[in-house]
């Protein structure tokens, strides 16, 4: 049985349709990624799955429970790491986790044990009794992950888990997720608009304007593209083009100072080309398709890389200057 | 049954969080205690030279119940407004996705406001002997019960307001158009029956008037019947505060459920 099942899910906000009839399944133990630009409907979908938002139509279930009718059972089976930090800066790391443990009905002894385990998993055991206010962005994120797994959820939701973090912390967080998956068999549903992150997922769905455009493993999606792009520079591009056409029966495009060629197995064809050609080649390069190419070919646009929430900077300004509550 | 224990635990931890933070921030305690002490000794001390004692009660003693009322009012509303802060800083989401009822969230918040208020009331009560007011154990107990009821109802009232606020920009409006008029028109600083007619009508409709009068019934019982004494029978004060508590408890729950 799937851990997440979504059927023809629709969510409208007035005249705007944020989620426009999406359907997908996530199997137990899978890391499933929702990839798309801002405003594509990723966070809305997460909010519905986390029971924070009711769907306009369609159904969603998590851990076998319906997100509307059985909201309480869903809440018990999930852990969430929201896009914006949701820690209390005026409490210590330990107190934040204890708060969470009690909200999820753990008793004191169990809570203490799990808090220690979770803190050491994310490498914050030495900071247990420090106020969260003093934590860096990366430490806060790690603490939120520790909190998210405290109630041993079946499904862990992560909304843009690495947004705004430095590359080192980003890698660290990916290591946690990989370790967690190996040790607990947890199902992870995450959203991202970082293409390189989507590659860590077992399966991804590309979402744009509230619809799933395509889904599959990162490899499958890339394989659906034409293939690798080869660029060969030569002093005589025309001659090179003619020779390739004649000897290899391919259709290269002449560009400034060379040719480009799209082939299925670039890594095998490139050496063969170089061996077989008599025209003098100055330089070669090969690019494999990225998920951005997939996105580009399907939607005709690039995924914007930064600038998530228009109020983000304002809120983080307020957070910095007003500290706690 | 396990479910009830779970909800109780949630109520406990939601109120514990706020109390913990209040106690941790020493400056906040000092700040909140400075207000009634300033009023009591600076305003009250100055005014007591203008206002003659009536029924054996001087002006500082007269405003003392009002200062308790003011302390409860500010502490309760402030505590309830933390919902807006929680929403702004995202922490409310952490509470809303937890497997607990909205009812427990409201009760937890109301208990938080009540316990922070009560803590401040207890500090203020240190001044009882200093001011020359004598109370016995029963009066002390009644004082705690009345303060507790008033604090709980005012926190619920604050939750009702906070559920409708989308950002803390509205905070100043609440302070200037709700909290301050409630304080000034409660009989805390001057007897309601001596107010100009229009203001008197407003004061009659102000639940804090009865909360403060209830405290006067306990602390200034000796001055009953004079201008400085309580204005209504204790039972009326109790009934109005209890009614206010019931109404705000229900409305705060409805309003929070809709907002959340």
Image: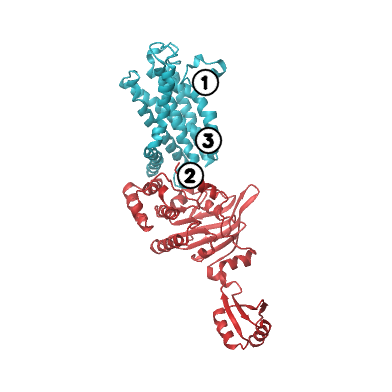
Residue A321 disc label: 2
**Residue B6 occupies which quadrant of the picture?**
top left
Instruction: Give the percent coordinates (x, y) of residue B125.
Output: 35, 25
**In what element is the residue under mark 1?**
helix
Q: Which chain is red?
A: A
Q: Chain of mark 2?
A: A
Q: CA distance from mark 1 to mark 3?
A: 23 Å
Looking at the image, which is closer to me, A170 or B110?
A170
**Label 1, on which residue?**
B203
The answer to whether tags 3 and 2 share a subunit is no
Q: Is residue B227 above or below residue B128?
A: above
Kindly tell me whether residue B21 is visible in this rendering.
Answer: yes
Chain identifier for the cyan-coloured part of the image: B
Q: Secondary structure at mark 2?
A: helix
Q: Nearer the viewer, mark 3 or mark 2?
A: 2
Instruction: For label 2, count other residues whose C-alpha is less than 10 Å away and answer few (under 14), some (14-19) or many (20+).
Output: few
The Cα atoms of the two marked residues, 2 and 1, are separated by 39 Å
* Between discs 1 and 3, the one toward the N terminus: 3
* SS at circle 3: helix
In-front residue for pair A101/B53: B53
Q: Output the chain of dot 3.
A: B
Q: CA distance from mark 3 to mark 2?
A: 17 Å
Question: In the figure, A79 relative to B131: above or below?
Answer: below
Disc number placed over residue B171 in the picture, else none: 3
Q: Chain of mark 1?
A: B
């Amino acid at each position: 049985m799937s851990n997440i099942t979504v059927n023809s899910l629709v969510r409208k906000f007035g005249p705007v349709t944020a989620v426009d009839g999406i359907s997908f399944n996530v199997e137990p133990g899978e890391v499933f990624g929702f990839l798309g630009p801002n405003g594509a409907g990723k966070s809305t979908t997460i909010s519905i799955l986390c029971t924070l938002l009711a769907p306009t139509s369609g159904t969603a279930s998590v851990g076998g429970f319906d997100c509307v009718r059985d909201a309480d059972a869903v809440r018990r089976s999930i852990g969430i790491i929201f896009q914006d930090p949701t820690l209390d800066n005026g409490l210590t790391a330990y107190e934040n986790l204890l708060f969470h443990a009690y909200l999820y009905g753990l008793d004191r002894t169990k809570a203490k044990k799990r808090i220690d385990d979770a803190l050491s998993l994310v490498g914050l055991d030495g900071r247990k009794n420090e106020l969260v206010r003093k934590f860096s962005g990366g430490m806060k994120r790690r603490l939120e992950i520790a909190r998210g797994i405290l109630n041993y959820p079946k499904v862990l939701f992560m909304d843009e888990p690495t947004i705004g973090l430095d590359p080192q912390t980003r890698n660290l967080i990916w290591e946690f997720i990989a370790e967690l998956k190996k040790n607990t068999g947890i199902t992870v549903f995450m959203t991202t608009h970082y293409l390189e992150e989507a590659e860590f997922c077992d399966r991804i769905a590309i979402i744009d304007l509230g619809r799933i455009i395509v889904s599959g493993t990162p490899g499958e999606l890339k394989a659906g593209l034409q293939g690798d792009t080869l660029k060969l520079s030569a002093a005589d591009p025309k001659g090179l083009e003619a020779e390739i056409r004649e000897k290899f029966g391919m259709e290269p495009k002449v560009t400034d100072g060379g040719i480009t060629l799209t082939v299925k197995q670039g890594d095998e064809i490139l050496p063969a080309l170089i061996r077989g050609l008599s025209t003098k080649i100055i330089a070669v390069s090969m690019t494999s398709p990225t998920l951005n190419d997939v996105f580009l070919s399907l939607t005709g646009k690039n995924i914007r890389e930064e600038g998530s929430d228009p109020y983000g900077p304002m809120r983080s300004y307020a957070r910095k200057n007003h500290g706690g509550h | 049954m396990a479910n009830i224990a779970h909800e109780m635990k949630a109520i406990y931890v939601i109120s514990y969080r706020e109390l913990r933070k209040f106690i941790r921030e020493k400056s906040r305690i000092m700040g909140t205690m400075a207000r009634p002490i300033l009023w009591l000794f600076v305003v009250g001390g100055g005014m007591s030279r203008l206002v003659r004692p009536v029924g054996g009660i001087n002006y500082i003693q007269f405003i003392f119940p009002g200062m308790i009322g003011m302390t409860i009012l500010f502490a309760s509303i402030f505590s309830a407004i933390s919902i807006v802060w929680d929403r702004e800083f995202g922490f409310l989401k952490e509470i809303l996705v937890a497997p607990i009822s909205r009812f427990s969230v409201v009760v937890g918040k109301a208990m938080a406001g009540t316990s922070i208020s009560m803590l401040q009331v207890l500090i203020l009560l240190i001044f009882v002997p200093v001011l020359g007011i004598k109370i016995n154990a029963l009066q002390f107990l009644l004082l705690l019960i009345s303060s507790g009821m008033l604090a709980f109802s005012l926190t619920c009232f604050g939750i009702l307001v906070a559920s409708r606020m989308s950002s803390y920009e509205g905070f100043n409006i609440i302070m200037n158009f709700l909290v301050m008029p409630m304080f000034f028109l409660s009989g805390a600083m001057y007897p309601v029956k001596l107010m100009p007619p229009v203001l008197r009508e407003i004061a009659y409709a102000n639940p804090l008037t009865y909360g403060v009068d209830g405290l006067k019934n306990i602390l200034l019982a000796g001055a009953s019947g004079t201008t400085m004494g309580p204005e209504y029978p204790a039972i009326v004060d109790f009934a109005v505060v209890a009614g206010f508590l019931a109404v705000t408890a229900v409305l705060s729950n409805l309003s929070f459920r809709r907002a959340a």
